[in-house]
Image: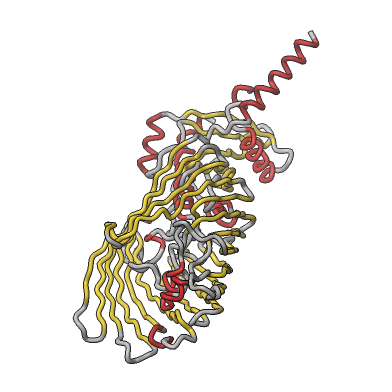
Amino acid sequence: MINKIAWGIIMVFIINNLVFSQDEFFEPSYTIGGYGELHYNSSKIGDAKPSKKMDFHRFIIYYGYNWTEKWSFKSEVELEHNYVKDGNGELELEQAFINYHTDKIGFQAGVILPSVGLINDFHEPPLFLSVERPEYSKYIIPTTWFGNGVAIYGQNKGLSWKAVVHEGLNGDGIESNYREGIRGGRQKGYKANAQELLYNGRIAYTGIPGLRMGGSYSTTKALRSEEGAKPIGVSLIEAHAKYDANRIMLVAEWGNINYTDHSAKSSTGYYVDLGYDIGQMINLSGKLYPWIRLTDINPSVGHDYENEKHYNKTMIGLTYKPINQIAFKLDYSTKKFLDKSVGEVTLINLGVGYNF
Amino acid sequence: MLLCTSLIGGDIKVDVEKTIRNQFGNDAIFSFQKLNLSSSVRTSIEKKVRQRFFKDFIYVWSIMDGDSVQAYALLDNVKGLSMPITFLVIYDIEGTIISSHVIKYREPYGGEIASPKWTAQFNGRNNDSDYNVGGQIDGISGATISVYSMSAGIMKLSLLFPKIKSLL
């Protein structure tokens, strides 16, 4: 009798533990998502005739598979400019990694993103106000910056962090594209030279609803192919903040890249966005943001042609989101270079973007 | 009782009951049940919220105060970017939210929605409240899909509560 009771207790314990070890809410599954954006751009230098173009700038598909709650695969394939032929357009594997996730810490390995600035990590078009991504996210932070590497990340009480070891940068590309910061040095995961790696660390605070503020540091030696040429030392430090609550959209990013053994000493820049959702005030369904952006970009500090490339830009715009995943955008801006012999640029952009 | 308890993942059940004890004290007495939701109830709410129920059932804990119930805790899931988000909403007997909690978050991004400051925004809301992100509910930069999904999920439970209260 005692044996039967004991066996009964043991069986209840085993059954409970067997079933409790399964999470019925999780099922191995595929995931699909994506985003895209269509742009109309009109650009005029001085009194010249404006150039006009329409471009389906980005079409992105996310694809993922979850084996277990902890182990998953995530990827993002991007087609830029709707066409790839003879050097036009780009087809890129921007993310493809194995992810191991627990409540406190996680790990990624594959094609990943260094965690730098607001837009490299979160670049879906409804998340930023302008038609094109901010120019800061091109000339200071070379979004989308992706490549082969590994990362660990974690989060605790409003603080999140990520540490990345990533393929480095190509020094030849940086030197020949000095007007674009380090953008020309990205290896994009293509047989990347791994003799020198990029080390990147980011910390962010999100403990207040609507607020994200953080910063990152990245460093590498960008190798050059010329015999005897020293690698370009690259140290990128940046700070970013975004407040999106109470109908206010306030964004600020600042970054500085210091170089050694390069024709420029540094690249530096910032932008500030301020928008306010007036949708409810005018009884409009959805959100309507009139907004303004101030930008200053100096990609080649100390270079002989510094003032030809250093500019500031004032942009005003209107962004309408009928639902949170779709944004219609209009912006107007003037771009003035410090070298007055470079003509003022007037830009008018229209666009629509989505994510799902 | 064994049948009921064995239908839910052990860690999740432990975390839910720890959350309830944090809210109502270590001596809190509660019972729990799996509640099947009829198709008609689910459909009417899904149309209004524009989000489907994760399953055709939820789990409910009834928290006692002596002989009478003082609160109900409803456990459900919503889809995040690629993984389910398991969350708990505790209601008073009138259907007003006392607190909300993320019990399990499974994604590398967007875990900030578990922040008590963010979930506190839902306190005091009920089936008549506004759950619109960007309106009455502030979002989280970098957690957009999770925020919209979770807000809609809590709204679903708030609309569900009056329809199931007589069954609890």
For the residue pair A244 and A21, the one nearer the viewer reads as A21
| Image quarter in which the N terminus of chain B is found | top right
Depth order, front residue of A61/A90: A90
Q: Which residue reaches farthest right?
A: A2
The spot of residue A218 in percent (x, y) is: 57, 68
Residue positioned 48% across, 82% down in the render: A263
Where on the picture, by quarter, is residue A100? top right
- At x 59%, y 31%, the residue is A22
Q: Is residue A38 above or below residue B20?
A: below
Residue shown at the point (46%, 72%) measured from the top left: A172
Q: Quadrant of the C terminus of chain B?
A: top right
- Residue at horizontal 58%, vertical 43%? B104
A217 lies above or below A99? below
Place residue A324 in its image quadrant: bottom left
- Which of A66 and A167 lies nearest the eye of the viewer? A167
B135, A29: nearer the viewer:
A29
Q: Position of residue A338 (x, y in %)?
A: 39, 89
